[in-house]
Amino acid sequence: MVPNMKELVKQAQKMQQKITQMQEELALKKVEATSGGGMVKVVVNGKNELVSISIEKEVINPEDPDMLQDLIIAAVNEGMHRAKEMVESEMSKVTGNMKIPGMF
């Protein structure tokens, strides 16, 4: 291997180690999102997994399940969006804003 190629491979391996470590750390981080003025609250982790849902009993109306469903969908979508932004922000610190296909 050419000396420059060896250095490039070494740098790529270092970056991969940092990315793996960052992914492990992000799995422990959580973001929160709400809808309906806080009536529905969700928590999503850095692995884009829904961790918890809290629903205030005042918003539970057996006569209008569609409203509750819409609030849950809105909160989950916002939580997933915030988790994605968190991951992209943290990973850009490791990758130097370099876009790596399939990484995020």
Image: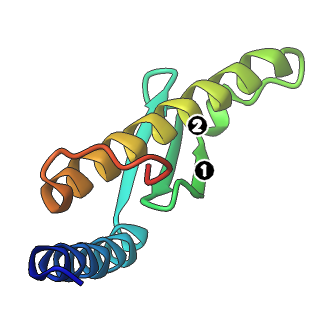
Taking depth in this image into account, of 7 and 77 the one nearest to the observer is: 7
Taking depth in this image into account, of 78 and 12 the one nearest to the observer is: 12
The label shown at residue 3 is none
Which callout, 1 or 2, points to the residue nearer the camera? 2
Residue at left offset 42%, top offset 38%? 33
Horizontal side of 68 relative to 93 (left or right) equals right
Residue farthest toward the front in the current orientation of the protein: 2
Q: Mark 2, residues whose alpha carbon is within 10 Å: few (<14), some, or many (≥20)?
A: many
Q: Position of residue 8 (x, y in %)?
A: 17, 72
Residue at left offset 51%, top offset 21%? 36
Type of the residue with mark 1:
Ile
The label shown at residue 53 is 1
Mark 1 or 2, nearer chain start: 1
Residue farthest toward the right in the current orientation of the protein: 63
Asked whether the beta carbons under mark 1 and mark 2 sit within 8 Å of each other, the answer is yes
Type of the residue with mark 2:
Val
Say which quarter of the image contains residue 64.
Answer: top right
Mark 1 falls on what kind of element?
A: strand
Horizontal side of 26 relative to 102 (left or right) equals left
Q: Is residue 1 above or below residue 87?
A: below
Mark 2 falls on what kind of element?
A: helix
Q: Position of residue 51 (x, y in %)?
A: 57, 61
Q: Is residue 60 above or below residue 16?
A: above
Taking depth in this image into account, of 72 and 24 the one nearest to the observer is: 24
Picture colour scheme: rainbow
Horizontal side of 87 relative to 12 (left or right) equals right
Which residue is under mark 2?
Answer: 76
